[in-house]
Image: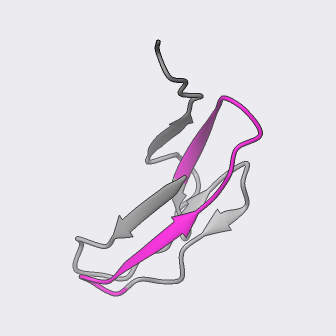
Amino acid sequence: MELTVTNQDNVRHALYIDGLNLMTRFLEPGESEVLTFYSEGEATYNYYDYEHRESPLGQIHAVKVTTYE
């Protein structure tokens, strides 16, 4: 899965995804970074601002998609 992270705030931030131990570098306002990760199966991952990890900003849901015939 690829996730593009863009800092739309006016201060630097880094996005951290719990359970994957994955994070962006510190992004200055307007900067972006693409994170690529793989999930072993369907899962839900919380994501945080790296410097403020006391409560999640949201969740990423990894799901399996199959073709329909």
Q: Is residue 31 left or right of residue 36?
A: left
Q: Is residue 52 magenta?
A: no
Q: Position of residue 54 (x, y in %)?
A: 58, 52
Say which residue appears at 72% left-offset and 54% top-offset. 20
Q: Position of residue 48 (x, y in %)?
A: 52, 56
Q: Is residue 19 left or right of residue 48?
A: right
Q: How is the image coloured?
A: one colour
Residue at the right extreme, as displayed: 40
Residue 6 lies in quadrant: bottom left
Residue 5 lies in quadrant: bottom left
Q: How many labels, in total?
A: 0
Q: Position of residue 33 (x, y in %)?
A: 43, 77
- Range of the magenta residues? 28-47
Q: Is residue 39 left or right of residue 25?
A: right
Q: Is residue 21 left or right of residue 31?
A: right
Residue at the top extreme, as displayed: 69
Q: Is residue 68 above or below residue 14?
A: above
Q: Is residue 43 magenta?
A: yes
Residue at the bottom extreme, as displayed: 28
Say which residue appears at 31% left-offset and 83% top-offset. 31
Residue 21 lies in quadrant: bottom right
Q: Is residue 56 above or below residue 64?
A: below
Say which residue appears at 31% left-offset and 73% top-offset. 7
Pick the front one: 25 or 13: 25
Q: Position of residue 67 (x, y in %)?
A: 50, 23
Pick the front one: 22 or 63: 63
